[in-house]
Image: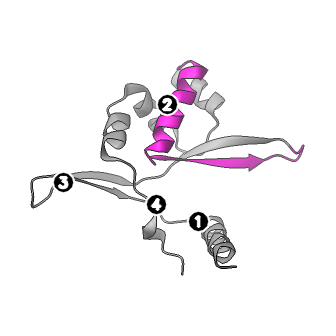
Amino acid sequence: MYDPSATDEPEFQAVVDALDDEDCHAIIEALDEPRTASELSDECDIPLSTTYRKLEQLTESSLLVEETQLRPDGRHTSQYRVNFEDVTIMLAEDNSLELRIARPPETPDERLASMWEEVRKET
């Protein structure tokens, strides 16, 4: 059965590094709706090569999700959207730092894709 909470969480340091980066902040703030790397580069006034590096950093830390947008002409493009509602760093009982990331609810399309992925694994 599909369990949305069973996703692999990113490394603590990867999330902290992404959140401590000024360009990453600008990208997150610009994502009020899904956007392409090119749109984000223009919006944030960040060179395109740097934008791609920051998008990779943000997706690897699971703060953003990359989605493929299919176009009528058969070409496709990647768009990015924010993949968290809240990031909390807490002190655990053993004095270690604990990271919790609250995720937004899945859209119907995402739920369907997840269910199909689970069906494919079981067959």
Q: Reply yes or no: does residue 90 show up in magenta.
A: no
Quadrant into which the C terminus falls: bottom right
Which one is closest to the eye, mark 4 or mark 3?
3
Disc 1 residue type (three-letter): Thr
- The residue pinned by badge 1 equals 107
Q: Is residue 69 above or below residue 121?
A: above
Q: Report the residue marked by disc 4.
A: 104
Q: Amino acid at mark 4?
A: Pro
What are the residue bounds of the magenta stretch? 46-74
User: Pointer 3: what residue?
Assistant: 90
Q: Residues within 10 Å of mark 4 (few under 14, many from 20)?
A: few
Q: Earlier in the sequence, mark 4 or mark 2?
A: 2
Instruction: Give residue 2's position: percent from left, percent from top.
Output: 54, 76
In-image side of 36 versus 94 (left or right): right
Q: CA distance from mark 1 to mark 4?
A: 9 Å
Q: Secondary structure at mark 4?
A: loop
Three-letter code for the amino acid on which mark 2 is drawn: Lys
| Labels 2, 1: front one | 2
> How far across and how far down the image is residue 98, in percent?
22, 54
Report helix, strand or loop for mark 1.
loop
Q: Nearer the viewer, residue 98 or 83?
A: 98
Reply yes or no: does residue 60 show up in magenta: yes
**Front-most of residues 52 and 25:** 52
